[in-house]
Image (spheres, helix red, strand yellow):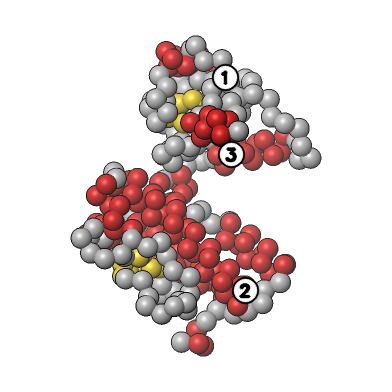
């Protein structure tokens, strides 16, 4: 067992890729089998991705502290209380967190320096996350394909069909920073296609609205805003930003 423990950046990354492949398999091609194994009537269950690219749903290890960081506990309990796609997305997010914790556990254990940790993260970051693969975001182009007439000239963010343009809020000017427009484009590319509430993908046949504070996009139905209601909103604040301001 000890001989198979990854010790270099390349070995840790290879271990990461194998575990990641196993988790993606569980949440996509083997999803029916995975769903059945996550019986809410059973005890706390975890989803493990193994270095041989296989997966298993099992009880957490009994040893304390465990040999490796443990995945999210009790994923089976939420199965029947959510829509299947939302539950799978939630498991995917926790799986991404677990993969990173395992990789950087190995890095800490074998004394990776700053440059080695940076290189490891860059290698990991070049791959789509499990969440992106499971939700389909990884298959999309960075910006959703639609005609130029569906975009607002004042922002690079995706817009609705022409009939819905007026209902979608135009993003406010971004704060100036060291990287200027390049940072704005990166933010558009990485965050413009997923709903900030449910994590679902952009679709041209659905009404979306942009928060003028955090600049994240939301399905109108997720934040209970209709196109008609949006017409009368001068500055839209999503539920998260509204609650932050209320606390202050």
Q: Callout 3: 10 Å neighbours few (<14), some, many (20+)?
A: some
Q: Position of residue 84 (x, y in %)?
A: 29, 47
Labels 1 and 2 touching (C-beta < 8 A): no
Question: Residue 142, image x and y in percent?
Answer: 54, 40
Residue 41 falls left or right of residue 120:
left
Q: Identify the element where label 2 is drawn.
A: helix
Mark nearer the N terminus (2 vs 3): 2
Mark 1 or mark 2: name the one nearer the start of the chain. Answer: 2
- Residue 168 shows up from this direction: yes
Given residues 36 and 63, the one toward you in this image is 63
The residue that appears at 38% across and 68% down in the rendered structure is 48
Q: Nearer the viewer, mark 3 or mark 1?
A: 1
Residue placed most toward the observer, 70 or 106: 70
x and y percent of residue 214 in the render? 59, 33
Image position of 109 with respect to 189: above or below:
below
The residue lying at 51 percent from left, 53 percent from top is: 128
* Figure quadrant of residue 34: bottom left
Which residue carries the number 3 mark? 189
How crowded pointer 1 is (Cα within 10 Å; few <14, some 14-19, many 20+) is rated as some
Residues at marks 3 and 1 touching, judged by CB atoms closer than 8 Å: no
| Residue 41 - label | none
Vertical position of residue 184 compared to residue 162: above or below: below
Crowding near the residue tagged with mark 2, few <14, some 14–19, many ≥20 C-alpha atoms within 10 Å: few
SS under mark 3:
helix
Query: Residue 235 bears which disc, if any?
Result: 1
- Residue drawn at the location 44% of the way across and 53% of the way down: 93
Q: Quadrant of the C terminus?
A: top right
Instruction: Of the two numbered discs 3 and 1 on the same chain, state the one appearing first in sequence.
Output: 3
Residue tagged 2: 108
State the image quarter where residue 10 is shown. bottom right
The residue that appears at 68% across and 63% down in the rendered structure is: 118
């Amino acid at each position: 067992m000890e001989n198979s423990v990854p010790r270099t950046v390349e070995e840790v990354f290879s271990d990461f890729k194998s575990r990641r492949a196993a988790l993606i398999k569980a949440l996509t091609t083997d999803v029916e089998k995975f769903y059945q194994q996550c019986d809410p009537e059973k005890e706390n269950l975890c989803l493990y991705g193994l270095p041989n690219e296989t997966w298993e749903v099992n009880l957490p290890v009994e040893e304390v502290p465990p040999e490796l960081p443990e995945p999210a506990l009790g994923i089976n309990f939420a199965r029947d209380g959510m829509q299947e796609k939302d539950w799978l997305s939630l498991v995917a997010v926790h799986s991404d967190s677990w993969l990173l914790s395992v990789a950087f556990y190995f890095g800490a254990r074998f004394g990776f320096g700053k440059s080695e940790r940076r290189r490891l993260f860059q290698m990991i970051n070049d791959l789509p996350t499990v969440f992106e693969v499971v939700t389909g975001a990884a298959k999309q182009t960075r910006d959703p394909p639609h005609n130029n007439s569906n975009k607002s000239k004042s922002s690079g963010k995706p817009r609705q069909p022409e009939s819905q343009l007026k209902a979608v809020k135009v993003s406010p000017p971004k704060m100036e920073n060291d990287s200027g427009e390049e940072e704005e484009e990166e933010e558009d590319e990485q965050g413009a296609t997923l709903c900030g509430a449910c994590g679902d993908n952009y679709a041209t046949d659905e009404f979306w609205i942009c928060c003028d504070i955090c600049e994240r996009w939301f399905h109108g139905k997720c934040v209970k805003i209709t196109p008609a209601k949006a017409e009368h909103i001068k500055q839209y604040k999503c539920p998260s930003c509204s609650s932050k301001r209320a606390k202050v």
